[in-house]
Image: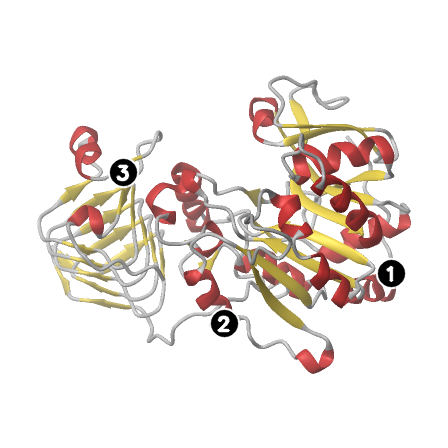
Amino acid sequence: MMAQPNPVSERFVSLITRDTLVLVLAGGKGTRLGSLTSHRVKPAVPFGGHFRIIDFPLSNCLNSGIRRIGILTQYKAHSLIQHLQQGWGFLRSELGEFIELLPAQQRTGEGWYRGTADAVYQNLDIIRLHNPRFLMILGGDHIYKMDYGAMLGFHVTHDADVTVGCMPVPMSQSNRFGIMDVDNNHRITRFVEKPDHCEGSPGQADQALASMGIYVFNTDYLLSRLMVDATRDDSSHDFGKDIIPDAVTEARCYAYPYRNMHDDGPAYWRDVGDIDSYWESNMELIGLRPELNIYDRDWPILTWQRQAPPAKFVLDEEGRRGEARNSMVAGGCIVSGAQVNQSLLSSFVTVDEGSVVDQSVILSNVRIGRNVRLRRTIIETGCDIPDDIRIGYDAEEDGRRFELSAGGIVLVTPEMLGQAVHHVR
């Protein structure tokens, strides 16, 4: 296990964060989330009642004191752009603060973004315009809380050219990540993207050290590498596959161990990359003491949400009692003579008499009719669930009508119900 990085003064960190430009990669298709990304890009997918996935890295930036941010978009970006315009337009440009949208514009040729590194390369002129000393590259599709200021301080005190955020993962998951070996001073000695086989970490043979897709670069170093990479026909123009492995062999490349900000407990980081992990991560929030504390006033998760009245639970008769147990219910919801058990209801959901919602994630603007039974489902925005339907009880029937995950979670969209209007918000 690597030792903890040395702490640095708040003043030292504040000077570094002011000289940092963050680029958030938010253009991936996110196809493993199935129909949840048929109308929106993955970072725009709702999470936790009224957040979007991209709200987590953006909130980390602001809470860390970083207020110069570019967001690189490409596929199905309308919902994401709308959310950013409505919820993240409060920064003050006259103070040098901004969140800029950087869509694929064929700025350097006829092609769209060919990979994560190429997406940054195609915006070299914008990076030079802002002239940062450091570039931080983030994914827009992970759920976590992290103080980027501490990582930047680590980068500077180690005189690094590149710093990679990392955390231990079970060996069984090593083929999903970039895996690295490090020496006693945190310097990376080897980096392989999604290996078929790898050795465990020293002292922890059952775990591997994995990249979180969070990178800090000295700007001059990264720009020089991107210009070289752009000319290579044998490159996939990807940070994990090309830029980082090359940096390990030719530059000072270090690993920054991600830790819980408040204690020495396990750090929370989730890649909600498929239907099962998305459902599980939402279900974790409902627990008594979830690892991810979204009620933390010291590190708030910011977002845009519609103005909504408080949630309402009506009727109090035997068999017609509106109630929710071990659940999270957002504003604007009405539970009328129905039961909600171990579920998460987003804004403006109505559940009518006699219905039972169990272990389900209900996105916004959903109507659930009378005498409905839902179990282990994800109901997409805008669905109108008809009376007397049962979903999540018969896998064979669910598989014919809806989208059934490997773990048995049923995803329902308006199109699957024969409803023409799909609300992508």
Spatial separation of the CA atoms under disc 1 and disc 3: 51 Å
Residue type at mark 2 is Gln
Quarter of the image with the N terminus is: top right
Which circle marks residue 9 in the picture?
Answer: 1
Residue type at mark 1 is Ser
Spatial separation of the CA atoms under disc 2 and disc 3: 32 Å
- Name the one closer to the observer, 386 or 24: 24
| Residue under pointer 3 | 403
How many residues crowd mark 2 within 10 Å: few (<14), some (14–19), many (20+)? few
The part of the image, by quadrant, that contains residue 188 is top right
Residue drawn at x 76%, y 21% as measured from the top left: 203
- In the displayed structure, 199 sits above or below 2; it is above
**Percent from the top left, x then y, of residue 133?**
83, 59
**Percent from the top left, x then y, of residue 43?**
49, 53
- In the displayed structure, 300 sits above or below 407; it is below
In the rendered view, does 409 fall on the left or right side of 294? left
